[in-house]
Image (cartoon, rainbow, N blue to C red):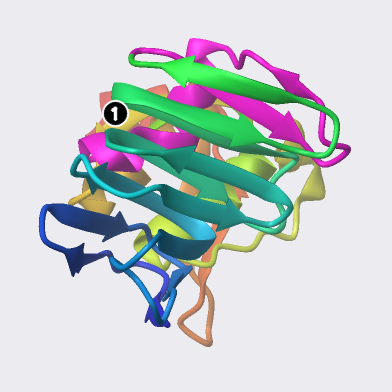
């Protein structure tokens, strides 16, 4: 098994022509007989695979199986996610779950709910789930509570707030994954919040109404 901690990402060579980019807060387990009759890995979290043509390649993510004989595709399967999302960039993969089985072609995505049903996710949902594979974090009208969880995962910034009314505030932002400073600034702007640290040096969010922000800017 190879694990990547929150705020970090990794790359794992699997075999000749096969690689896996590992998302933050994720673990990949590689089958012991990898590359013989079958190529198999298990994903807990998120990973981006580039697989050369060859023996059957299989990804196990919770109760979902993703198979191909050669493709470039990404998987997101964190335990707290409402669905597993698979996006195919090149080639095609077959996705098998309890209640459905589908082939997903290049340029397409599929979402598998916890009950095994499948649906085509919105482009916004795919960008939010797998934007990291393109070097960004991307949210469109996502609840602040969800964004806070993602900030903890991708930037290792486990924010809290005493004002739970902020949780439902919508956030729309798209910033580089490499810059936590840009991400915090975009979050403050979109959600009208202020990022600070408490007396124990832990990151917290506070309400920052736009009128106060504008007044501050005028005064400065």
The location of residue 94, given as percent across then percent down, is 53, 30
Foreground residue among 184 and 99? 99
Asked if the stretch drawn in magenta spans residue 36, the answer is no
User: Could you say which quadrant of the image residue 10 lies in?
Assistant: bottom left
The location of residue 148, given as percent across then percent down, is 57, 51
Image point (34%, 67%), residue name = 7
Quadrant occupied by the N terminus? bottom left
The location of residue 20, given as percent across then percent down, is 27, 57
Q: Give the range drawn in magenta.
A: 107-135
The residue under label 1 is 217
Q: How crowded is mark 1: few (under 14 residues within 10 Å), some or many (20 or more)?
A: few
Image point (74%, 38%), residue name = 97
Looking at this rendering, what residue extends furthest in the bottom direction? Answer: 200
User: Height in image: 177 above or below 18?
Assistant: above
User: Height in image: 219 above or below 151?
Assistant: above
Q: Which SS class for mark 1?
A: helix
Image point (42%, 70%), residue name = 6
User: Height in image: 104 above or below 12?
Assistant: above
The location of residue 61, given as percent across then percent down, is 60, 54
Q: Tag count in the figure?
A: 1
User: Height in image: 162 above or below 217?
Assistant: below
Asked if the stretch drawn in magenta spans residue 109, the answer is yes
Q: In this view, does 53 lie to the left or right of 29?
A: left
């Amino acid at each position: 098994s190879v694990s990547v901690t929150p705020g970090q990402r990794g790359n794992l060579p699997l075999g000749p022509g096969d690689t896996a980019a590992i998302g933050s807060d994720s673990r990949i387990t590689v089958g012991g007989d990898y590359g013989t009759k079958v190529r198999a890995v298990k994903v807990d979290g998120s990973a981006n695979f580039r697989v050369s043509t060859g023996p059957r390649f299989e990804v196990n993510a919770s109760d979902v199986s993703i198979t191909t004989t050669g493709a470039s595709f990404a998987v997101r399967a964190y335990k707290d996610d409402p669905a597993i999302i698979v996006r195919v960039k090149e080639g095609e993969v077959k996705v098998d779950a309890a209640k459905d089985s589908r082939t997903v072609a290049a340029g397409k995505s599929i979402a598998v709910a916890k009950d095994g049903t499948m649906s085509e996710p919105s482009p916004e949902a795919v960008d939010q789930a797998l934007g990291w594979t393109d070097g960004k974090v991307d949210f469109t009208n996502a609840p602040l509570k969800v964004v806070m969880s993602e900030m903890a995962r991708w930037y290792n910034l486990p924010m809290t707030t005493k004002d739970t009314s902020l949780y439902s505030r919508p956030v729309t932002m798209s910033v580089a994954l490499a810059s936590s400073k840009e991400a915090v600034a975009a979050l403050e702007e979109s959600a009208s919040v202020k990022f600070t640290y408490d007396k124990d040096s832990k990151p917290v969010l506070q309400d920052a109404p736009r009128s106060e922000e504008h007044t501050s800017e005028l005064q400065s």
